[in-house]
Image (cartoon, rainbow, N blue to C red):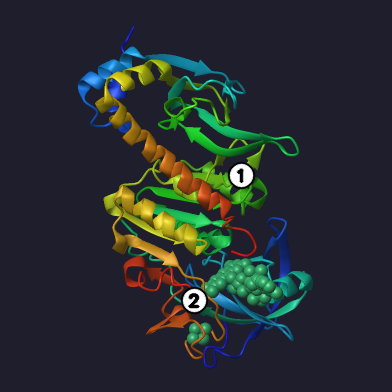
């Protein structure tokens, strides 16, 4: 089987990460596949993984009893899914569902968390990258909240 | 064409067709009451539409500039004039002054990739630019249209977007701010489409129209991708009265948005851009 190392080394999210860390991440990585409609995780689940989407589309949803499932974001090939694995209490905050056949690389967050505790340099490198994603999501959420295209724009 | 000798005198046009676009937005097709030489305009320009006894509002031209016998405007009913036009309906008569203002840089864009970013009703003034690009497709590099709407029900020109998507020479990406189950498209603000869009940042002309906050974040994201500030064009839609640089209603320092705009090269306007009121 081909190793996932070259894919991880070339992914923009992991750009400039030292080769030994790429190796380490490869040890925690596996290929996964989700069928259309399949939930990848649900709100309240333990957050033990994150995913690098290779192909397909995933929706991030919030369920409201009165309105049903509301999609607040879609994630596509090249994007990163899931950051709760890095932040205690390591619980998924939303539902994630594949809209179409989706292939991804799953990274075992539980295993990585332990490695980050032992190796703070690795922890810092990953935290830097994930905080960038979290800030992007926060900014997007703020714009969504502004209801920019509402009547009183 | 409208009375150019006196830009304050509106010419009467009849609403020939009304097309419902979304629950609050509609497109009117206007034809002159009296025969004239046709109406020519450049993509990005606007008309002042006058409802007799009610008032006037600036509205962008959204039809194909190659068609001069009739013109189209997509209007969102948000206030006095726009709701009055909606009430007039088919057969109603409106006054038209125009076309006014600057246009999208379609000549400068030749030989370059073009990325068009539109938010909400901001797609209307960009549609004539797309028609013109498609009419001279070989003159341009890659074309990306990134469009953001509030919900799937707010997507303008749905059929046309679907048709354009079927072409193999343009990338069309649509996203909505939120959606309930059943929508299989993208969800997220329009800026999230920029990192994945196909264009060469160093040889790209960007044209943006939408709410100012959306344009601000779009510009930032385009700059992050490496698009040069002098290659970014935006449409500033500020309040207007005369539309021709007389009343000062839209003035900021030496700049009149009605006359020097509404389309501006971003590096020439960034001192005004984001100002609370003009
Ligand atoms: C160059 C240019 C091009 C444009 N192109 C288009 C276009 O193609 N299509 C389009 O639909 N619009 C376009 N606009 C915007 C349009 O001109 C404005 O929305 C215009 O104000 C509409 O006039 P109105 O009389 O219908 O609304 P107004 O009565 O002037 O109301 C304007 C805004 O004020 C709010 N408002 C009204 N009354 C109240 C109140 N009592 N309290 C609080 N808020 C209130 C309304 O919700 C609305 O958002 C363009 C503007 C410019 C400058
Ligand atoms: S609207 Fe009168 S000067 Fe611009």
Q: Position of residue B68 (x, y in %)?
A: 57, 71
Name the residue at 40% across, 40% down. Answer: B196
Q: Position of residue A13 (x, y in %)?
A: 33, 32
Q: In the image, A25: left or right of A92?
A: left
> Residue at label 2?
B277
Secondary structure state at the residue bearing disc 1: loop
Q: Are marks 2 and 1 on the same chain?
A: yes
Name the residue at 76% across, 76% down. Answer: B92
Work out whether mark 2 precedes mark 1 in sequence or the reverse, and give the earlier one: 1
Q: In the image, B238: left or right of B195?
A: right
> Which of the two marks, 2 or 1, is nearer to us in this view?
2
Secondary structure state at the residue bearing disc 2: loop
> Residue at label 1?
B178
Identify the image quadrant of residue A16.
top left
Q: Position of residue B80 (x, y in %)?
A: 71, 76
Q: Residues within 10 Å of mark 1 (few under 14, many from 20)?
A: many
Q: Residues within 10 Å of mark 2 (few under 14, many from 20)?
A: few
Q: Is residue B55 above or below residue A11?
A: below
Pick the residue in front: B163 or B23: B23
- From the image, which quarter does the C terminus of chain A lie in? bottom right
Q: In the image, B130: left or right of B96?
A: left
Question: Can residue B132 be seen from the camera position used here?
Answer: no
Pick the residue in front: B151 or B117: B151
Between the residue at mark 2 and the residue at mark 1, the CA separation in whole angstroms equals: 30 Å
């Amino acid at each position: 089987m081909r190793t996932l190392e070259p894919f991880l080394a070339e992914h923009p999210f992991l750009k400039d990460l030292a080769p030994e860390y790429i190796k380490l991440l490869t040890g925690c990585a596996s290929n996964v596949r989700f069928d259309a409609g399949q939930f990848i995780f649900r709100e309240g689940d333990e957050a033990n993984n994150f995913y690098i989407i290779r192909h397909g589309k995933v929706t991030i949803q919030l369920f409201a009893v009165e309105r049903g499932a509301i999609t607040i974001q879609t994630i596509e090939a090249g994007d990163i899914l899931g950051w709760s694995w890095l932040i205690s209490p390591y619980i998924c905050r939303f539902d994630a569902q594949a809209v179409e056949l989706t292939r991804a690389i799953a990274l075992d967050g539980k295993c990585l968390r332990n490695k980050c505790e032992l190796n703070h340099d690795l922890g810092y490198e990953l935290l830097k990258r994930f905080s960038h994603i979290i800030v992007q999501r926060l900014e997007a959420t703020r714009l969504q909240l502004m209801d920019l295209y509402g009547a009183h724009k | 064409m409208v009375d150019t000798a006196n830009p304050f005198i509106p010419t009467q046009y009849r609403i020939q067709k009304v097309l419902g676009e979304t629950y609050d937005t509609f497109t009117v097709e206007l034809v002159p009451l009296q025969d004239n030489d046709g109406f020519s305009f450049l993509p990005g320009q606007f008309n002042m539409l006058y409802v007799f006894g009610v008032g006037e509002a600036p509205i962008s031209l959204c039809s194909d500039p190659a068609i001069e016998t009739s013109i189209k405007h997509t209007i969102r009913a948000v206030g006095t004039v726009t709701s009055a036009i909606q009430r007039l309906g088919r057969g109603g008569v409106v006054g038209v002054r125009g076309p006014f203002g600057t246009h999208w840089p379609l000549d400068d864009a030749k030989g370059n990739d073009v990325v068009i970013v539109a938010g909400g009703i901001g797609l209307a003034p960009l549609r004539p630019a797309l028609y013109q690009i498609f009419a001279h497709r070989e003159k341009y590099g890659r074309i990306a249209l990134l469009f953001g709407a509030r919900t799937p029900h707010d997507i303008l020109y749905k059929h046309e977007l679907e048709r354009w998507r079927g072409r193999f020479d343009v990338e069309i990406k649509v996203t909505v701010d939120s959606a309930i189950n059943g929508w299989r498209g993208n969800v997220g603000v329009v800026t999230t489409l920029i990192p994945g869009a196909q264009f060469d940042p160093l040889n790209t002309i960007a044209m943006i129209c939408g709410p100012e906050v959306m344009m601000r974040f779009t510009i930032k994201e385009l700059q992050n991708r490496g698009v040069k500030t002098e290659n970014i064009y935006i449409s500033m839609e500020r309040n207007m009265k005369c539309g021709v640089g007389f009343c000062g209603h839209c003035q900021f320092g030496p700049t009149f948005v009605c006359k020097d705009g509404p389309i501006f090269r971003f590096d020439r306007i960034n001192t005004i851009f984001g100002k609370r009121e003009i």
